Image: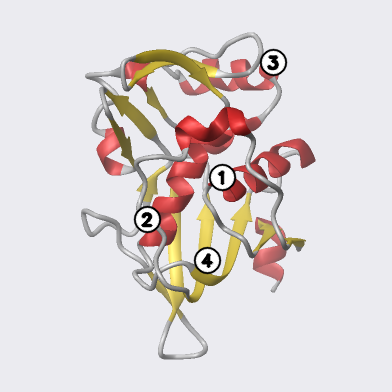
Amino acid sequence: ADTASPTPAAPPAAAENAAAVPAAQPPGGFVGIDLGVTCVVSSSKSEDRHAVTVNTNDVSGRSTPAAVSYDGKQRHVGMAAEGRLMSAPKQTLNCLPLTLGSTDVVKSRADRYLWLFNVQEDGKLGPVNFDGEDFATEPYGPLAALLKVLVSYAGAGAPEELCVAVHDFLTQAEVASVRTALAIAGVERFSLLRHSDAVAM
């Protein structure tokens, strides 16, 4: 498993993506996140030491769409974002883990998954309109907002330990972007592992 502690400083350019997400709370316990392509799942420790509890999201669902949508002065995350795919397609960024690759790879994925938002030549997503401004965002910015909300579903405040499982096909550069997103989300201690490693454990 890849381990990072402490995390690197968050890039200044991503500051606009760190707002409008749940505020930090007192330290909690263990939180696990399965970073899927279209949906993500958050879990936390159970009273049974041989099991974990799958956390429910704000609509009591066990899985959360990997999406963020920009709406005026609001940023919708998860189910609320997915609900805007038809009404605000260019403002809604979905399949967020797939947006972390090189520009050519991400544009190929955009064609395959029929994304309705734009991918710029430099790999940024958008432009989107937020708080009266039009801008293109680095993919790790919206991912940071998603990850912070997922951690909040554990209900125990900031975790003492966070483990994120990512797909095997993500490149080292894409995994590095997940690390950056976690840093922006304010997670100081975390570990990353591939899905195949998680299954083996």
The Cα atoms of the two marked residues, 4 and 3, are separated by 31 Å
**Residue at 35%, 62% in the rendered image:** 153
Count how many numbered circles sit on residues in the image.
Answer: 4
Answer few, some or many: residues within 10 Å of disc 1's Cα (few below 14, many 20 plus, some between 14 and 19): many
Cα–Cα span, label 3 and label 2? 36 Å
Residue 99 appears anywhere in the view: no
**Residue 35 location (% of width, % of height):** 54, 50
Q: Earlier in the sequence, mark 1 or mark 3?
A: 3
Q: Counting other residues with Cα less than 10 Å from the Cα at mark 4, is it few (<14), some (14-19), or many (20 or more)?
A: many
Q: Secondary structure at mark 3?
A: helix
The quadrant in which the C terminus is found is: bottom right
Q: Amino acid at mark 1?
A: Ile
Rendered image: mark on residue 184: 1
Task: Look at the picture and state if 88 lies above or below 94.
Answer: above
Name the residue beneath numbered marker 2. 23
The earlier-in-sequence mark between 4 and 1 is 4
The label number, if any, that marks residue 32 in the structure image: 4
Residue 42 screen position, x and y as percent: 44, 61
Q: Answer whether labels 4 and 1 touch (C-beta < 8 Å).
A: no
Q: Disc 1 to disc 3, how far (Cα)?
A: 25 Å
Q: Secondary structure at mark 4?
A: strand
Percent across and percent down for residue 19 are 40, 39
Say whether residue 170 is visible: yes
| Label 1 to label 2: alpha-carbon separation | 13 Å
Q: CA distance from mark 2 to mark 4?
A: 19 Å
Residue 58 position, x and y percent, is: 24, 55
Judging by the rendered image, the residue that carries numbered circle 3 is 104
Q: Amino acid at mark 3?
A: Asp
Q: Earlier in the sequence, mark 1 or mark 2?
A: 2
What amino acid does circle 4 point to?
Gly
Q: Nearer the viewer, residue 60 or 11?
A: 11
